Image (cartoon, rainbow, N blue to C red):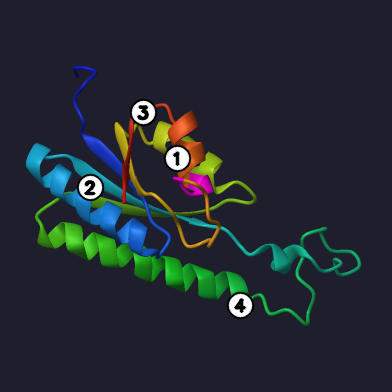
């Protein structure tokens, strides 16, 4: 296949308005060029989930009995809703789509970059900022890192 052909577009989503706009844009591109869209959510448990001392005899990141393990389950349900919403949008547009939810701690950008490479994605489409609330001059920290380190082109949608 020629190098400049885009056949698989990765769309990382986090529930933010910027990610939704990026997904819409990616679906539009995919429809025009007959590419596949891969919707990805990286489960990133909040740091407070790991801030407690481990239960004696358990691994260092084990959650204490007072902190329900359901945090992970709840985050997984939210992630499934996010990727399925984008999947439905793509299917309505007649675009071939697949979804993935991966767990990665601590680096979300590294998880996106690694997933894109392993999945042989030709383009990453993502929003300028995510839901972290971290204000950067032009780009969110996750987007900025992906732009600088991805193996393929990254289209940033605002």
**Real-space CA distance between mark 2 and mark 4, rounded to the nearest whole angstrom:** 33 Å
Residue corresponding to mark 2: 26
Reading the chain from its start, which is encountered first: label 2 or label 4?
2
| Element assignment for label 3 | loop
Q: Residues within 10 Å of mark 4 (few under 14, many from 20)?
A: few
Write down the quadrant of residue 90 in the picture: bottom left
Per the rendering, the mark at residue 152 is 3
Reading the chain from its start, which is encountered first: label 3 or label 2?
2
| Element assignment for label 2 | helix
Dominant secondary-structure state across the stretch colored magenta: loop
Reading the chain from its start, which is encountered first: label 1 or label 3?
1
Residue corresponding to mark 4: 70
Q: Magenta span has 86? A: no
Q: Residues within 10 Å of mark 1 (few under 14, many from 20)?
A: some
Question: Residue 149: image x %, image y %?
Answer: 49, 30
- Contact? badges 2 and 1 (CB < 8 Å): no
Please identify, in this view, whether the residue under mark 2 or under mark 4 is nearer the observer: 2
**Real-space CA distance between mark 1 and mark 3, rounded to the nearest whole angstrom:** 12 Å
Residue sticking out furthest to the right = 56
Magenta region, residue range: 138-142
**Real-space CA distance between mark 3 and mark 2, rounded to the nearest whole angstrom:** 15 Å
Residue corresponding to mark 1: 115
Question: Residue 137: image x %, image y %?
Answer: 49, 46
| Count of number-bearing discs | 4
Please identify, in this view, whether the residue under mark 3 or under mark 4 is nearer the observer: 3
Q: Magenta span has 139? A: yes
Q: Residues within 10 Å of mark 2 (few under 14, many from 20)?
A: many
Please identify, in this view, whether the residue under mark 1 or under mark 3 is nearer the observer: 3
Left or right: 27, with 99 as reference point: left
**Real-space CA distance between mark 2 and mark 1, rounded to the nearest whole angstrom:** 17 Å
């Amino acid at each position: 296949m020629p190098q400049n052909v885009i056949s698989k577009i990765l769309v990382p989503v986090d529930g933010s308005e910027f990610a939704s706009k990026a997904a819409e844009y990616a679906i539009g591109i995919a429809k025009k060029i007959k590419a596949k869209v891969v919707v990805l959510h990286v489960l990133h448990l909040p740091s407070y989930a790991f801030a407690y001392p481990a239960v004696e005899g358990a691994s260092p990141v084990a959650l204490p009995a007072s902190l329900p393990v359901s945090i992970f389950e709840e985050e997984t349900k939210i992630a499934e809703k996010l990727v399925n919403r984008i999947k439905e949008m793509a299917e309505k547009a007649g675009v071939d789509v697949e979804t993935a939810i991966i767990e990665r701690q601590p680096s979300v950008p590294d998880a996106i970059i690694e997933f894109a490479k392993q999945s042989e994605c030709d383009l990453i489409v993502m929003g300028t900022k995510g839901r972290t609330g971290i204000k950067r001059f032009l780009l969110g920290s996750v987007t900025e890192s992906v732009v600088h380190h991805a193996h393929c082109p990254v289209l940033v949608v605002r």
